Image (cartoon, grey):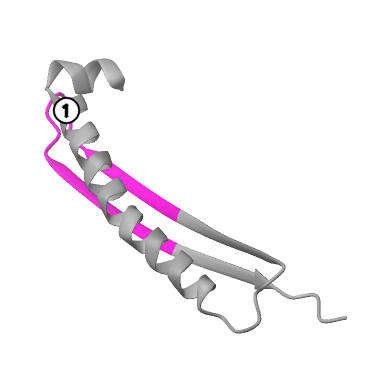
């Protein structure tokens, strides 16, 4: 698949789309951290999981690209 993408210049499209996705994740991550810091009772553990999906369709030319995402935030408190 990578060879076909390179032949069509599609690897550049893939890199651009990935850069665009990462530009979206950074402010979301900063917002999550800011909100964690504002909690009156801090969690013992916290995690944020980003799910990303990118789909490219076409033969030698990438003619259609789409994507989707999800965000899962988990906080745990040990209140003993």
Residue 45 location (% of width, % of height): 68, 64
Of 29 and 60, nearer the camera is 29
Kindly state the secondary structure of the residue where label 1 is placed.
Answer: helix
**Residue drawn at x 23%, y 51% as measured from the top left:** 66
Instruction: Check residue 77 for magenta coloring.
Output: no
The quarter of the rendered structure image containing the N terminus is: top left
| Quarter assignment of residue 5 | top left
Of 72 and 32, nearer the camera is 32
Of 34 and 22, nearer the camera is 34
Residue 13 location (% of width, % of height): 16, 34
Examine the rendered structure and indicate whether residue 35 appears above or below residue 53.
Answer: below
**Residue drawn at x 31%, y 60% as measured from the top left:** 27
| Quarter assignment of residue 64 | top left
For mark 1, what is the residue? 12
Instruction: Check residue 52 for magenta coloring.
Output: yes
The residue segment tinted magenta is 51-70
Residue 76 location (% of width, % of height): 70, 72
5 relative position to 68: left or right: left
Examine the rendered structure and indicate whether residue 2 appears above or below residue 71.
Answer: above
Crowding at dot 1, Cα within 10 Å, few <14 / some 14-19 / many 20+, comes out as few
74 relative position to 50: left or right: right
6 relative position to 40: left or right: left
78 relative position to 11: left or right: right
**Residue drawn at x 11%, y 28% as measured from the top left:** 61
The quarter of the rendered structure image containing the C terminus is: bottom right
Examine the rendered structure and indicate whether residue 30 appears above or below residue 59.
Answer: below
What secondary structure characterizes most of the magenta part? strand
């Amino acid at each position: 698949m990578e060879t076909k993408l390179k032949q069509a210049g599609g690897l550049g499209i893939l890199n651009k789309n990935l850069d665009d996705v990462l530009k979206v994740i950074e402010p979301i991550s900063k917002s999550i951290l800011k909100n964690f810091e504002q909690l009156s009772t801090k969690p013992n553990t916290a995690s944020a999981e980003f799910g990303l999906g990118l789909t490219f369709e076409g033969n030698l030319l990438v003619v259609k690209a789409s994507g989707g995402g999800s965000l899962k935030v988990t906080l745990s408190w040990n209140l003993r």
